[in-house]
Image (cartoon, rainbow, N blue to C red):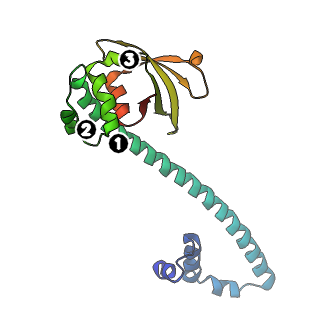
Amino acid sequence: MVDSQVRRAPNATTQFVESKVKFAKNKTMLWLEGEAEDELQKLVTYAMKRAQEMSRLKKERDVKITAAIERRTHEMKQRRDKTLRNKTETKVRPLVGKVVSRENFLQLFPESSTEVVDAILPILENPASVVNKYLLHTWTDEDGVDVCYQGLVQKSKRKGTVLTISYWKMEETIDDCVDFDVQFKQFVTDILFKELEFV
């Protein structure tokens, strides 16, 4: 019965269609016709107020459900991204400190653009070559919002596997910077993901 009503009124809300079906199945009209005029008026007035309240509650519930779906979708995307990122870091790690040909690199990362390959190949061979370079680095905060930071690579340590980078927000200056240690494989992975670029 619901399906037929939906086909007859495709633009009607689910709430309206369900109410119409219940009205018919429960024989509400026959019951109303048996009520006195003053009682009928009270019932209609109450029903109208109740319908408005239910409509408001439904909208609030829909907003909460939509927010929950978006949150779960974002969490699922983050898990997928994290899995892909981990796989990429695993591929990058054995390349650190090695001379890697463009052909071999593209076999590992076939979707890499020429610009990205040109940026990565020299620093794979010599991680310390990024020291004193300025960069823009995009991070995703806890709310799933992308935030861009300015950065300056201060030093390379642990045989090139770790970089110390000073970061500061776009509206700040280098005097406001905070130092972070970043694994070199993560640094290269962020370039591959186009979340980090030199400036």
Residue located at (46% from left, 30% from top): 137
Residue located at (22% from left, 33% from top): 102
Assess whether mark 2 and mark 3 are in contact (beta carbons under 8 angstroms). no
Question: Mark 2 packing: few (<14 Cα in 10 Å), some, or many (20+)?
Answer: some
Residue located at (52% from left, 34% from top): 147
Q: Position of residue 42 (x, y in %)?
A: 78, 75
Label 1 SS: helix
Q: As displayed, is residue 114 above or below residue 164?
A: below
Number of the label disc, if any, that sits on residue 65: none
Image-based side of 33 in relation to 5, left or right:
right
What amino acid does circle 3 point to?
A: Leu
Using the rendered image of the protein, determine whether residue 177 is visible from the camera's viewpoint: yes
Number of the label disc, if any, that sits on residue 163: 3
Q: Position of residue 33 (x, y in %)?
A: 70, 88
What amino acid does circle 2 point to?
A: Phe
Using the rendered image of the protein, determine whether residue 86 is visible from the camera's viewpoint: no
Q: As displayed, is residue 147 above or below residue 154?
A: below
Question: Alpha carbon of mark 3 to alpha carbon of mark 1: how far?
Answer: 26 Å
Q: Identify the image quadrant of residue 95.
A: top left
Label 2 SS: loop
Label 3 SS: strand
- Residue that mark 1 sits on: 80
In this view, the residue in front, 32 or 74, is 74
